[in-house]
Amino acid sequence: MIAVVDYRAGNLTSVKKALDHLRADAIVTGDPEVVAQADKIILPGVGHFSSTAILEQSGLRTAILHRINHGVLFLGVCVGMQWMFECSAEAPGIPGLGLFPGACGRFTESVKSPHVGWNSLTCHDESRLLRGIRSGSFVYFTHSYSVPVVKQTVARCEYGGEFSAAVEQDNLFGVQFHPEKSGALGLKLLENFCCLSC
Amino acid sequence: MLTKRIIACLDVNAGRVVKGVQFKQLRDAGDPAELAAAHSKAGADEVVLLDISATHEKRTTLADTVRRTARQLFIPFTVGGGIRSLDDAIAVFEAGADKISINSAALADPSLITRIADRYGSQAIIVAIDAKRLNGEARFEAYVSGGRNPTGRDAVDWAREAEERGAGEILLTSMDCDGTGAGFDCDLTRACSEGLNIPVIASGGGGDTQSFVDVFERGRADAALAASIFHFGLHRLGDLKQELQSAGIPVRRPC
């Protein structure tokens, strides 16, 4: 069972709808005990980094970390991916999970913000999540903050400089774009995640 | 590279897509859920569903229409028309919209923009502005109530205020060009796009491929709205993107 973590982030229904379309066994839950029994976890998110504070207060952060340490596959989307890093300039007082190194920063003033629309990916070959998705593929972004390119980056994107579009290490996956809104390619990515085993 | 978006707009009346000439002589054009999926397949980068129902009774079908349309749509989906309060917005989001568009209600109570942005994020709120040129000058006035009532507000100033209050995008319609097919108002679009730090969607006047090239190049638009059922067949949408690509405009292809 895939737990789609409910912390009042906007795109929950979109993510659930895409998983339903793929006939995946997924439930939307804000209950740490349900998360503690999930085989896979998806943390959606769109909006403000401060909304992740509720994960700490509700006990979801502890439940998620516990499952991650047991090797459960975890996918963070947008703010969900940003939360996997150390912190964000959008909400300096709120720590991320620190699973990946670095902080989330605002786009430079040379470009419009938010970065909204379809932008192309530069993919690395070794990604399990991006299997079948080629460099140059377009996916849908909508965000004002981004994380830098790091060792775990498996897809980069260019907008006022390069940033991480996807990160991956062992059982941990994150995407800055919205696979649930990226047409057939996005569904392919979600299907890859559903089919992955630990 | 970030591409220029072509957004397909479906006008919906009492749960059915309609087409007409400047909102008159409405004719049934089909089911919103089927047409939205068909537009996505034909290459639309986003779909906007605009509820033009004249009466409140007809409008109550909106949530159901949004739910059915969202179910099979995996590209960004915006809903506008008749959203007057935070509760109206919540109902549309819960039915599956990714973004909502507000127009008259935002001018009547600008704090509504901030309240929706605080709850769903700025990326989820588009402020739509209907603008009309002042006596041939390069200045534009914002209108409300489907273009019936002037507000006395400068359209670009209002767009800037909407940005400050938390709007994530501006949907800018030229009332002078709307329905003509003779080209977008590139002066209006450029004034707004250069004066703001959020994306501007140009609307009104889209016709041949060159009109889209012009609004992206001269008008500096980030996206263009095509009332596709009105102006285009579905094939035309795919051709348009191919022609834009040939003209050097970055677009998402293949879709």
Image (cartoon, coloured by chain):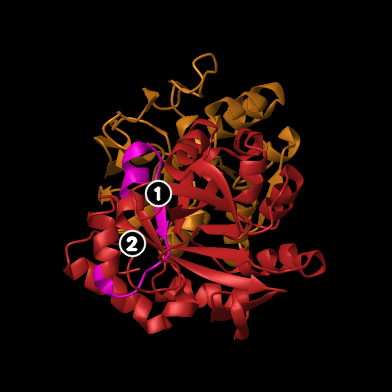
Chain colours: A orange, B red
Q: Is residue A32 above or below residue B32?
A: above
Q: Quadrant of residue B82?
A: bottom right
Q: Quadrant of residue A14?
A: bottom right
**Numbered range of the magenta stretch:** B190-210
Q: Is B131 on the left-hand or right-hand side of B50?
A: left
Q: Is residue B96 above or below residue B57?
A: above
Q: Is residue B180 above or below residue A36?
A: below
Q: Is B82 on the left-hand or right-hand side of B185?
A: right
Instruction: Residue at 76%, 46% (x, y): give it.
Output: B87
Q: CA distance from mark 1 to mark 2?
A: 33 Å
Instruction: Residue at 72%, 33% (x, y): give it.
Output: A32
Check residue B236 for magenta coloring: no
Subunit bearing disc 1? B
Residue A188: image location, x then y, percent: 44, 62
Residue B128: image location, x then y, percent: 53, 51
Q: Is A121 on the left-hand or right-hand side of B31?
A: left
Q: Is B141 on the left-hand or right-hand side of B101?
A: left
Residue B216: image location, x then y, percent: 27, 57
Q: Assign the C terminus of chain B to one quadrant of the image.
A: bottom left
Check residue B207 for magenta coloring: yes
Front one among B80 and B74: B80
The residue at the far top in this view is A93
Q: Quadrant of residue A36?
A: top right
Tag 2 residue: A132
Local secondary structure at mark 1: strand
Q: Residues within 10 Å of mark 2 (few under 14, many from 20)?
A: few
Subunit bearing disc 2? A
Instruction: Residue at 29%, 30% (x, y): give it.
Output: A150
Q: The disc labelled 2 sits on which kind of residue?
A: Gly
Q: The disc labelled 1 sits on which kind of residue?
A: Val
Residue A152: image location, x then y, percent: 32, 35
Tag 1 residue: B200
